Amino acid sequence: MFKELTLAAALALGVSVQAPDESTVDLRGEDWDDARGEAVITDVQDDEKEIRIDASGLEPNATYSVWLINDAPLMGEMGIGSGDLIFESDELGRGYSVVRIPSEQFKDWDKIEVMHHPNRDTEDVESAELTLTGVLLSER
């Protein structure tokens, strides 16, 4: 009841309650037809964005990394894919990851990718397999 009164008071006083800016990116399997997921991107602070990955259809009990990719013609594909951008799938092939990056840096990326690392070595990008991909709608 207190919550309803607080909301009514805020509305009566003309106070706006603003939800964080949030967008969802569908992640689709490349070579993995059963893999799917979504990335929910939320402004958590003025200078940070949070990316929540929720995926299924992955190889069970396996290692994955999240990559933010810039495929500008002059730069080739460049991205971030280490540190907190690594997660393990569970025994049912579901994976979940939450990462934060600086908001200023986010505008540099065109897409998000999830890579499978069959040998569990996330530094070995040559052996990595593209599992999921989605296009980011940036504020360029």
Image (cartoon, helix red, strand yellow):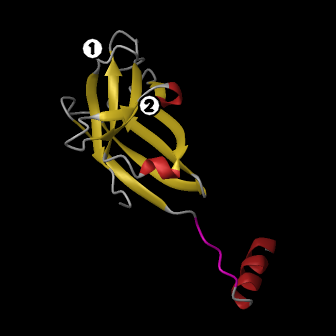
Quick check: 102 left or right of 92? right
Magenta range is: 15-19
Q: CA distance from mark 1 to mark 2?
A: 20 Å
- In the image, what residue occupies the spot 53% across and 29% down? 84
Three-letter code for the amino acid on which mark 1 is drawn: Ser
Looking at the rendered structure, the secondary structure element under dot 2 is strand
Residue 135 in sight here: yes
Q: Which residue is mark 1?
A: 127
In the rendered view, does 1 fall on the left or right side of 95?
right
Q: Amino acid at mark 2?
A: Gly
Foreground label between 1 and 2: 1
Residue tagged 2: 95
Q: Position of residue 111 (x, y in %)?
A: 31, 45
Q: For residue 129, what is the image quadrant?
A: top left
* Depth order, front residue of 104/6: 104
- Magenta includes 79? no
Which residue is outermost to the front? 74
Image quarter where the N terminus lies is bottom right
Residue lying farthest to the right in this orientation? 2
- First along the sequence among labels 1 and 2: 2
Residue 107 vs 132, above or below: the answer is below
- Label disc, if present, on residue 78 of the rendered structure: none
Q: Residue at x 33, y 27 (%)?
A: 115
Judging from the image, what secondary structure is the residue with disc 1 in? loop
Quarter of the figure with residue 140: bottom left
